[in-house]
Image (cartoon, helix red, strand yellow):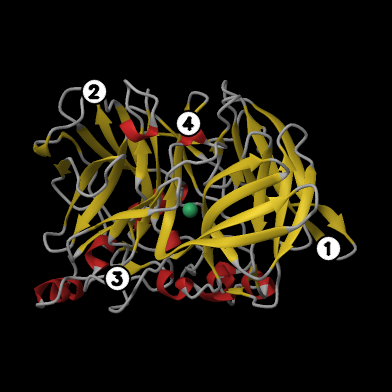
Amino acid sequence: MSEATQATADSNLPPSCAGGLENLDDEHSYYIDDIRGEVPSDLRGTFYRNGPGRQRIGGEPYGHWFDGDGMLCAFTFTGERPHFRNRYVRTPKYIDETREQSIRYRGFGTQKPGGLLANIGRMPANPANTNTIEHGGRLLALNEGGKPWQLQPGDLSTVGECTFDGALTGNEVFSAHGKVHPRSGDYINFGAGMNGFGLKGPKPCLNVYRINTNGSLYKQRAVALDSFPFCHDFVITDRFAVFFINSIVFGDMLSVLAGFKTISDVVHFDSDRAMKVIVVDLETLETKREFSMPPGAMIHFGNAWEQGDEIIVDGMFTDNFEANETLADVFKPDARFGGGEFRRYFLNLASGQARDEIISDLEMEFPTFDTRRTGDAGQATFAACSVDNGANSFFNGIVCVDPNDNTSSHILTPGSYASEPLYAPSTTSDKTADGYLLEVVYDARKHLSELQIFSAADISAPRCVLGLKHHVPHQFHGFFSAS
Ligand SMILES: [Fe+2]
């Protein structure tokens, strides 16, 4: 731990989340000995997590949480002792900066040393740090600013950048939040891009991709937009994909291209800009309907489903982008990572009318659900939440919003922090309630992390805790692979 983090830990107050942002430079592989409770015998598979494993290189912090290098963690359950492994994705950025022990690349909020000449015309490097998916025979590390990076499932070694056999070309990028379509098994994803040139210059678009269970990217279409989108996540139903084009906008990108500013410097919330919602047909990948909503931003989504003429979409709403100030200075002593508000949108494809309602006023983020039920109505949503327990610099609890919109929660001990809870199914039951919720928790008092395993039917207390030998830096997203 750094001296600043240690100083916080030595006070009488519960320690902040800051230690959970320190590097985990070492790569581990071991069977877990510290097992409190009993590992469920019907929990089998691998729980993958991805996130920035380091926020400093050569002691110098990056200029944004999004610029830390991607490090995958894998908790593997076979019926014997669980196994843990962590490994960095060997991107050019990771390799070069590890060798030089200094910042060598421009990032979302990080300038490459060397002034304007070192940054002019350079786009952020891809740190492969946001999410992971196993589909079509590939394990991928994902970041929306670049192409996927393929890893070996067993030892997490890096295979290389993935273009889906050349289907992703040029500057085409691939979001971190693709969805598996339950009926077809296809993996649906998108990337913000440009589709040719018009009178006003490059024509912005969303490239929508469909990849079959053999890993072949067999369908692609550009959905035209009127501005370059801030679009991080989306939803699918059985027949549709739904994209929320937020009121968060990219400002003066010329100053970014000229090397004066980073993208983080110019991205901001525009309270005069309506939020546009685009519904895309999953068969044709053509736009089915567009909606205009009051200004706002939906960063992460829960489930969505079709009901009569309506598509109903769950997600986390915010009306500002103040969080970016924290993300750009994660080691600030009073840094606080906040969440959003659980809202439900009702989009009527027949009338073009749209409305929304607030499901919970609890501060929460990182919504997840039993993805076998993607597109099904009446499913439970799980999320990270933040409550005032004397230590809420980061998410400090998990919440379950049941099909009747009732909320139950588990609040961590003050000084413990966690983010996205992920659902893992039982191998012996297809009922959501019989599965599990997996949550990596950082204990700032001990500067150690553990995996807490909850029954999905009752999150009031973990039924099993797996203690690690080290901390795991706060991560973003994950995936449970039953194979
Ligand atoms: Fe995300």
Report which residue position mark 1 lands on: 201
Counting from the top left corner in percent of width and height, residue 353 is at: 75, 57
Horizontal arrangement in the rendering, residue 195 relative to residue 298 (left or right): right
Vertical side of 239 occupied by 41: above or below: above
Question: Which of the two discs, 2 and 4, labels the residue nearer the N terminus?
Answer: 2
Vertical side of 196 occupied by 105: above or below: below
Visible residue check, residue 126: yes
Element marked by disc 4: helix
Question: Which of the two discs, 2 and 1, labels the residue nearer the N terminus?
Answer: 2
Query: How far apart are the two marked residues, 3 and 4, measured between alpha carbons?
Result: 33 Å
What residue lies at 61% left-to-right and 36% top-to-bottom? 188
Query: How far apart are the two marked residues, 1 and 3, measured between alpha carbons?
Result: 43 Å
Question: Which of the two discs, 1 and 4, labels the residue nearer the N terminus?
Answer: 1
Counting from the top left corner in percent of width and height, residue 413 is at: 17, 61
Question: Which of the two discs, 1 and 3, labels the residue nearer the N terminus?
Answer: 1
Report which residue position mark 3 lands on: 393
Q: Could you tell me the amino acid type at mark 2?
A: Thr
Report which residue position mark 4 lands on: 372
Q: Is mark 3 within 8 Å of ligand 1?
A: no
Q: Which residue in the rendered view is the most extreme toward the right?
A: 199
Disc 3 and disc 4 in contact, CB within 8 angstroms: no
Q: Could you tell me the amino acid type at mark 3?
A: Ser
Query: How far apart are the two marked residues, 1 and 4, measured between alpha carbons?
Result: 42 Å
Label 1: few (<14), some or many (≥20) within 10 Å? few
